[in-house]
Amino acid sequence: MLLRTASSFSLVNANANANADADHILPLINPSSAIRCYSHAKSFVPCATKGSNNRPLTGVVFEPFEEVKKELDLVPTLPEASLARQKYTNESEAVVNEQINVEYNVSYVYHAMFAYFDRDNVALKGLAKFFKESSEEEREHAEKLIEYQNKRGGKVKLQSIVMPLSEFDHEEKGDALYAMELALSLEKLTNEKLLNLHSVASKNNDVHLTDFIESEFLGEQKRTEVSMGPNLECRMYEAKYPEVDMAVMIQVKNIADMGAYVSLLEYNNIEGMILFSELSRRRIRSVSSLIKVGRIEPVVVLRVDKEKGYIDLSKRRVSEEDIQACEERYNKSKLVHSIMRHVAETLNIDLEDLYIHIAWPLYRKYGHAFEAFKIIVTDPDSVLNTLTREVKEVGPDGQEVTKVVRAVSEEVKDSLVKNIRRRMTPQPLKIRADIEMKCFQFDGVLHIKEAMRKAEAAGNDDCPVKIKLVAPPLYVLTTQTLDKEQGILVLNNAITACTRAIEQHKGKLVVKEGARAVSERDDKLLAEHMAKLRQDNEEVSGDEDSEEEEDTGMGEVDVDNGSGITE
């Protein structure tokens, strides 16, 4: 910064005559010294000496740079204002103070939880340690914000702290679950306040505060929320590891030098390995043709080391029967898992707790939870009301008492039944067969209609049969049913009845495509085909005469004169 002070040297005109006397050299600035020039050949040498300041400064004005002027304008005039404050708005300062208060309040609540779980009659030392660490962490956050407030030139204004609860017991949820849910809600509140602070900083173009919140708080806050949130990962079965010689469903993750690393989809994606020697019974020419990353397929378990967590698998030893049984079991388990996970997400509860109290007991009782879920569709009380669990409580005398309560609360029951009915209510299947039917007798159309009535009469209330004309001689027979096998059987009986009826009148029926289940896409293609045939029939009509057709018949006949044909 250039200051308006006198220099310790005098500036002289460098273009002055070098031969002139030193006394005639004109100083530009000479408050305390002078620069004198002495001639040496054709050059001069300036030197600084303390000398006289005989002439006043004229014609030269020194001004500070414009940037320096702006900085000088920012220097506070009030003694209580901070010299370090720069582009730090009052709104940002107020929101930072509010966040400091939030952090201290949350820390105080966590400290109350620590004191509760550290009691001798509660004695949950793990939770006590967790909440003590959480309290210290929130207090550190408040102190970090205080330091930042001071660095930016703001004023820290602490507010009063709300007195927290001293008891965290809950009659239905228990103290541990209730405390964790409360802690999660506090973390979400803190995160919302941080996001508000971030938005205020962004609105005021405070890049420094925005970066501080992002780097020091938001990432850590989200990780804390996730750690406190419900666990949505769990294996499908009660056993942690599969049994030897059991077929399991895997997904290939990586192909290494000696084998392929896979994830066991039914066991919470624990890792297993398939050696290249276990890929095929034949000589391996190309590994990529036998196994690919991302592929899902059944394999058989060779060895399980439960202590180290190693699982060896084989692809070449799995039989066709094992493949079919594994795929059927996996599809059922995947549906059960999807329903349970959706309930856990909706109610914000731990997925493993749902499995422990609902799914795994149903696996033990019904062989597979899928079978129990099918009963729940029509009669949920007969399945869910029988599930119980043990809850340990401390009685008035301080003794621990074990109580047996229902495993499924009304809230969980309603959500579970709703999801099961939505996902597992059977949808009617559409069964269709395509036939060609012809009868060239004099009244063949009537015989065909009679055969169609015979076909529809073969249906019943559960599987009503309908027959439609697509385009002569093509007809389609359809039915809708919940039982695929029954629907195919009824449609085949209808074809048999129709064949007998038309053959009695020397007609012929040929099955183009047998009875089969069809999708909505097949129905759409059939409807488009029938619409196209109708359109073609309308465009080419044999009853309409061409306007350009010439009459080249017998000419005009004069009936009145009886003169025959006239030209």
Image (tube, grey):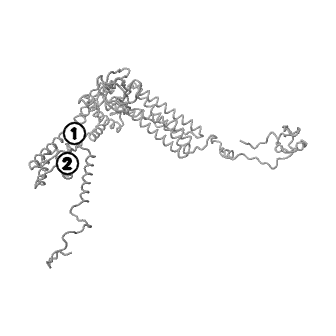
Which quarter of the rendering shows the N terminus?
top right
Q: Which amino acid does label 1 sit on?
A: Thr
Residue 340, x across and y down, in percent: 31, 35
Residue 357, x across and y down, in percent: 30, 30
Residue 378 bears which disc, if any? 1
Is label 2 in a helix, a strand or a loop?
strand
Depth check: 483 or 114 in front?
Answer: 483
Depth check: 533 or 202 in front?
Answer: 533
Q: In the image, is 22 to the left or to the right of 84?
A: right
Depth check: 318 or 77 in front?
Answer: 318
Q: Which of marks 2 and 1 is nearer the N terminus?
A: 1
Q: Please determine whether, in this image, residue 124 is positioned above or below residue 513.
A: above
Is label 1 in a helix, a strand or a loop?
helix
Q: For mark 2, does the 10 Å Cα neighbourhood hold few (<14), some (14 to 19), or many (20 or more) residues?
A: many
Residue 268 makes an appearance in the image: no
Q: Please determine whether, in this image, residue 396 is positioned above or below residue 491.
A: above
Q: Which amino acid does label 2 sit on?
A: Val
Distance from the alpha carbon under mark 2 to that under mark 1: 35 Å
Of tags 2 and 1, the one toward the viewer is 2
Residue 476 bears which disc, if any? 2
Which quarter of the rendering shows the C terminus?
bottom left
Q: In the image, is 78 to the left or to the right of 294?
A: right
Report the number of discs: 2
Is the residue under label 1 in contact with that under label 2 (CB below 8 Å)? no
Q: Residue 491 occupies which quadrant of the picture?
A: top left
Q: Name the outermost residue toward the left.
A: 504
